[in-house]
């Protein structure tokens, strides 16, 4: 299915890069393309960023926090809590070839970035630092926009077992 | 060495407290003994010791079997065991007594089982790896004996079964009970067809751009596509597949229909994120969208009321009533659980009841009999709650049933 994967990834990245964060859901800040590795526990678990008294997100720069700026469209266990990081899979897992993508705002430089949530596959669920921020999610009829699918599916070396999710920058939105 | 000293001191204090407690208990026991003796003195003569219990019947270990047919008030709580997805399970509970009746072990990323029309068998699409979570992937339909819950057979199917958030459309039987339909996503989309009479894999039907299997007749079903169209598929008797692709009938986009509809006869009731009911009638090669209506009034919408959860709708065909998990929230809360179920008369399309729940619910189901029960579970909680589906009264809570309960299946 490499042709499909490649097509899906190209398409998703293209759309994500053409779409500004503010154009989606009135500035809520998410564009879900592709889908998520993990079944969604109810959104109450962490869909909204926790704000301080000053209205700011105090954890925007903490990769192990659900409120980390790159996690605006993530759904799963944070690889940074599982032996990897926001950019690398934990030892012994495989990074999924197909990803879902979000467009997140970085308060550090004021820019919007396209973030690729590559899943790490091949071991049982990490179970640490579950994070679910699913703004922009669609029903599974629109597969490319739904975060209810397991994108470890189709990974030839680690088909289906989901471990955790990364949040890798693909590029700035221009 | 300071820490051990402190620890010993703490132990001593605890021992002293225990000692005082024991003395107090002993005093109470003595008082109770005196009172008991006084009471006995005025009562009938002391009876002899009760007879010794007889040995349990049978000389060998025994295993329970379930009565048949299954009670209409039983429920299968399907559990994909999110923290340990290789250990999917299905739990059977009697809603009338709250008794836990039995378990199926159902493999990796489990969705849900389907009951055969005659009630004798349980069909369960399952995924296994040769080394637990790695190695060769094998997908099967396991056939369980509904009386013993023993595996009675299995059918190999293509290793493509969708790993997704479980929904009823993942697996379904055609109305004649013959063909099991299983949704595949790898990420190419297709339907696996299994003949449950001959117990053989029949074919795989590609449904590119579309998802799930919704039965629509003796040997037909439809899948819904991302653009709002549907593909209607008939498994003709000669083994050929007849398909018809409809126009874009179902709403997608800003207020899309969810993949969680319920069925009454030829009509599937879809619901949108904002709580619009979209009746979708399918007969043969003809599909029609009937006028939509809303679960909420304008005032309720202004207060943020909307449906949410996983198995967020249920229906009683006999009562012609629709049940919906409701909560207050904004955009992107379409999967949030709710703490109330609203009930609608499908003929008048009016709300007839609000059932307050004891705890949050993400899935509901209503039994198919004339005096139905309403079951509720929350995906992040272990308990099953049981209500009278007519009066709305809470009947009982069955504790510690599941790890992450998903969809509920009733006979």
Image: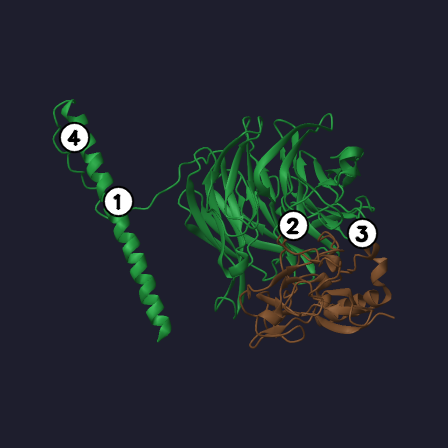
Chain colours: A brown, B green
Q: Are marks 4 and 1 on the same chain?
A: yes
Where residue B340 sits in the image (x, y, percent)?
A: 63, 37
- State if disc 3 and disc 1 touch (CB < 8 Å): no
Of mark 2 and mark 4, the one earlier in the sequence is 4
- The residue indicated by pointer 3 is B227
Q: Which chain does tag 2 point to?
A: B
Marks 4/3: CA–CA distance: 82 Å
Q: Is residue B374 left or right of residue B69?
A: right
Where residue B223 sits in the image (x, y, percent)?
A: 71, 48
Who's the residue at 13% across and 28% down the image?
B47
Q: Are marks 1 and 3 on the same chain?
A: yes
Mark 4 neighbour class, 10 Å CA radius: few under 14, some 14 to 19, many 20 or more: few
Foreground disc of the pair 4, 3: 4
Vertical order, B387 against B163 (above or below)? above
Q: Which chain does tag 3 point to?
A: B
| Residue B239 marker | 2
- The residue indicated by pointer 4 is B37
- State if disc 1 and disc 4 touch (CB < 8 Å): no
Of mark 4 and mark 3, the one earlier in the sequence is 4
Marks 2/3: CA–CA distance: 29 Å
Vertical order, B266 against B179 (above or below)? above
């Amino acid at each position: 299915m490499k042709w499909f994967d490649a097509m899906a990834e190209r398409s998703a990245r293209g759309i994500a890069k053409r779409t500004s964060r503010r154009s989606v859901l009135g500035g809520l800040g998410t564009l879900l393309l592709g889908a998520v590795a993990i079944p969604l526990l109810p959104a109450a678990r962490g869909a909204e960023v926790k704000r301080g008294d000053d209205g700011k997100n105090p954890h925007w720069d903490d990769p192990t926090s659900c409120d980390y700026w790159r996690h605006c469209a993530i759904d799963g266990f944070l690889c940074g809590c599982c032996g990897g990081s926001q950019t690398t899979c934990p030892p012994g897992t495989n990074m999924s070839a197909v990803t879902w993508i979000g467009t997140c705002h970085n308060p550090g430089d004021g820019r919007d970035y396209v973030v690729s949530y590559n899943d790490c596959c091949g071991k049982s669920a990490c179970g640490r630092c579950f994070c679910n921020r699913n703004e922009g999610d669609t029903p599974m009829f629109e597969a490319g926009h739904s975060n209810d699918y397991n994108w470890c599916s189709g990974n030839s070396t680690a088909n289906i077992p989901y471990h955790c999710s990364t949040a890798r920058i693909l590029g700035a939105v221009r | 060495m300071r820490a051990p000293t402190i620890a010993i001191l703490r132990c001593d204090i605890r021992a002293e407290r225990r000692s005082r407690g024991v003395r107090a208990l002993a005093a109470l026991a003595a008082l109770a003994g005196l009172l008991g003796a006084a009471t006995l003195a005025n009562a009938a003569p002391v009876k002899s010791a009760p007879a010794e219990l007889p040995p349990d019947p049978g000389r060998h270990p025994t295993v329970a079997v379930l009565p048949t047919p299954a009670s209409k008030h039983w429920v299968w709580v399907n559990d994909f065991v999110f923290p340990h997805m290789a250990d999917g399970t299905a739990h059977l509970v009697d809603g009338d007594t709250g008794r836990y009746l039995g378990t199926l072990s159902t493999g990796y990323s489990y969705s849900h089982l389907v009951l055969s029309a005659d009630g004798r068998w349980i069909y369960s699409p399952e995924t296994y790896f040769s080394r637990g979570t790695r190695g060769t992937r094998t997908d099967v339909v396991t056939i369980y004996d509904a009386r013993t819950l023993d595996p009675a057979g299995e059918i190999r199917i293509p290793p493509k079964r969708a790993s997704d958030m479980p929904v009823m459309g993942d697996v379904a039987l055609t109305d004649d009970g013959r063909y099991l339909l299983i949704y595949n996503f790898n990420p190419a989309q297709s339907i696996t067809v299994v003949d449950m009479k001959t117990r053989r894999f029949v074919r795989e039907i590609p449904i590119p751009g579309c998802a799930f299997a919704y039965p629509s007749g003796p040997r037909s079903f439809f899948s819904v596509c991302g653009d709002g169209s549907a593909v209607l598929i008939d498994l003709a008797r000669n083994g050929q597949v007849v398909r018809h692709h409809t126009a874009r009938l179902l709403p997608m986009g800003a207020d899309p229909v969810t993949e969680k509809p319920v069925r009454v006869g030829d009509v599937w009731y879809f619901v949108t994120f904002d709580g619009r009911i979209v009746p979708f009638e399918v007969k043969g090669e003809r599909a029609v969208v009937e006028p939509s209506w809303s679960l909420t009034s304008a005032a309720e919408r202004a207060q943020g009321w909307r449906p949410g959860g996983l198995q967020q709708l249920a229906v009683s065909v006999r009562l012609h009533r629709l049940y919906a998990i409701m909560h207050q929230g904004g955009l992107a809360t379409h999967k949030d659980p709710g703490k109330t179920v609203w009930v609608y008369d499908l003929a008048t399309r009016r709300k007839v009841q609000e059932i307050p729940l004891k705890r949050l619910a993400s899935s509901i189901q209503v039994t198919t009999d004339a005096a139905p029960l309403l079951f509720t579970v929350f995906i992040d909680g272990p308990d099953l709650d049981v209500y009278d589906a007519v009066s709305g009264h809470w009947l009982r809570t069955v504790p510690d049933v599941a790890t992450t309960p998903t969809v509920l299946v009733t006979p």
